[in-house]
């Protein structure tokens, strides 16, 4: 009797690599998309097709870009099989694009989509001229302020680990219009101590600094001194200066020895779900240093 020969599968490495790449987003997912509960299935499909088209506008896609695209689709609740959306690119109609542009009916929705386009296209290599042109054309469907665009690009860079120099002598960042400037002139303090470093990502109400403040006169306590005369004792209280938003601290300091100031680059509301991810990325970066 002839011995049966086992047939060996072909392209084992390639197939396994694809499957492992598809599993990766499920093990280490990105935060849920801002658009996840704001688009129906039809418009999610258009989102995925347009996003794929932006990445492929340079004519190819790398493994890192494929992985990022799969993760972005998964966070929207879509199948991570990107080949499906590649096949739809040629068939997407102007009416579908028009419908999608109308569904994104506020700047947060629109900027969230453009953010994803930039994140996927820039995750491996700098943007090509073709990608820049396509993303510019997408932005031109709507009207964004220059600040909105710069702020979005800043957070794309931070998310990808393309960090900016936030040292106090870097005027381009410290004095950037992206920064929100706060002065605590109503709170003269002494023994001021800063609790966070420049460049640190902070949640809302994070304590930036502490200091000691004398209580107001109406709260002055009268004490009986030895000998029967009355005197006043001014109590001192530890005051905490807290961040008035969510963002990355770009500068801090003291004015005239007693007044705290700080600047921070705010996290846009459409990226609020990224807070834990940004903290983790920063922690991992610090651990490597």
Image (cartoon, grey):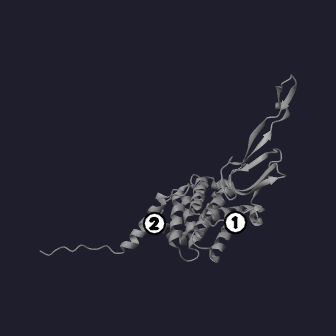
Residue 271 on image: x %, y %: 63, 56
User: Mark 2, residues whose alpha carbon is within 10 Å: few (<14), some, or many (≥20)?
Assistant: some
Q: Which numbered tag is attached to residue 21?
A: 2
Q: Secondary structure at mark 1?
A: loop
Front position in the image: 86 or 155? 155
Furthest residue to the right? Answer: 229
Residue at 77% across, 65% down: 171
Q: Nearer the viewer, mark 1 or mark 2?
A: 1
| Residue 278 vertical placement versus 222 (above, below) | below
Instruction: Kindly tell me whether residue 70 is visible in this rendering.
Output: yes
From this view, report whether residue 214 is shown above or below residue 248.
Answer: above
Query: Where does the image place residue 149, in percent across and percent down from the top left?
Result: 71, 64
Does residue 39 appear to the left or right of 250 in the view shown? left
Q: Label 2, secondary structure: give it.
A: helix
For the residues marked 1 and 2, what is the alpha-carbon distance in whole angstroms? 33 Å
On the image, which quarter does residue 15 sit in?
bottom left
The 10 Å Cα crowd at callout 1, few under 14, some 14 to 19, many 20 or more, is some
Question: Which of disc 2 and disc 1 is earlier in sequence?
Answer: 2
Is residue 285 or residue 53 the one in the foreground?
285
Residue 248 position, x and y percent, is 68, 57
Residue 72 drawn at (x, y percent): 54, 61
Quarter of image, res 125: bottom right
Residue under label 1, please give it: 165
Please say whether residue 105 is visible from this viewpoint: no
Residue at image coords 52%, 73%: 62
132 relative position to 176: left or right: left
Report the front residue among 100 and 21: 21
Q: Nearer the viewer, residue 172 or 133?
A: 172
Q: Residue furthest top?
A: 228
The quarter of the picture where the N terminus appears is: bottom left
Query: Among all residues in the image, which is located at the extreme front?
Result: 227
């Amino acid at each position: 009797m002839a011995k049966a020969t086992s047939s060996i599968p072909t392209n084992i490495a390639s197939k396994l690599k694809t499957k492992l790449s598809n599993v990766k987003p499920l093990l280490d997912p990105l935060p849920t998309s801002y658009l996840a509960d704001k688009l129906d299935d039809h418009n999610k499909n258009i989102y995925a097709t347009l996003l794929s088209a932006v990445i492929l506008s340079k004519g190819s896609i790398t493994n890192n870009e494929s992985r990022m695209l799969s993760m972005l689709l998964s966070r929207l609740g879509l199948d991570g099989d990107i080949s499906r959306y590649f096949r739809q690119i040629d068939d997407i109609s102007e009416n579908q694009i028009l419908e999608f542009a109308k569904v994104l009916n506020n700047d947060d929705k629109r900027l969230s989509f453009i953010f994803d386009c930039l994140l996927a296209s820039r995750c491996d290599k700098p943007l090509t001229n073709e990608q820049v042109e396509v993303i510019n054309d997408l932005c031109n469907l709507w009207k964004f302020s220059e600040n909105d665009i710069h702020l979005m690009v800043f957070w794309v860079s931070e998310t990808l680990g393309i960090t900016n120099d936030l040292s106090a002598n870097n005027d381009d960042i410290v004095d950037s219009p992206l920064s929100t400037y706060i002065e605590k002139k109503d709170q003269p303090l002494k023994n001021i101590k800063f609790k966070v470093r420049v460049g640190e990502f902070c949640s809302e109400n994070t304590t930036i600094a502490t200091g000691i403040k004398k209580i107001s006169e109406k709260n002055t306590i009268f004490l009986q001194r030895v000998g029967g005369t009355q005197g006043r004792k001014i109590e001192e209280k530890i005051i905490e200066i807290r961040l008035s938003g969510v963002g990355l601290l770009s500068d801090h300091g003291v004015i005239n020895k007693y007044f705290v100031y700080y600047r921070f680059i705010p996290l846009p509301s459409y990226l609020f779900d990224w807070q834990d991810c940004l903290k983790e990325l920063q922690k991992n970066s610090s651990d490597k240093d």
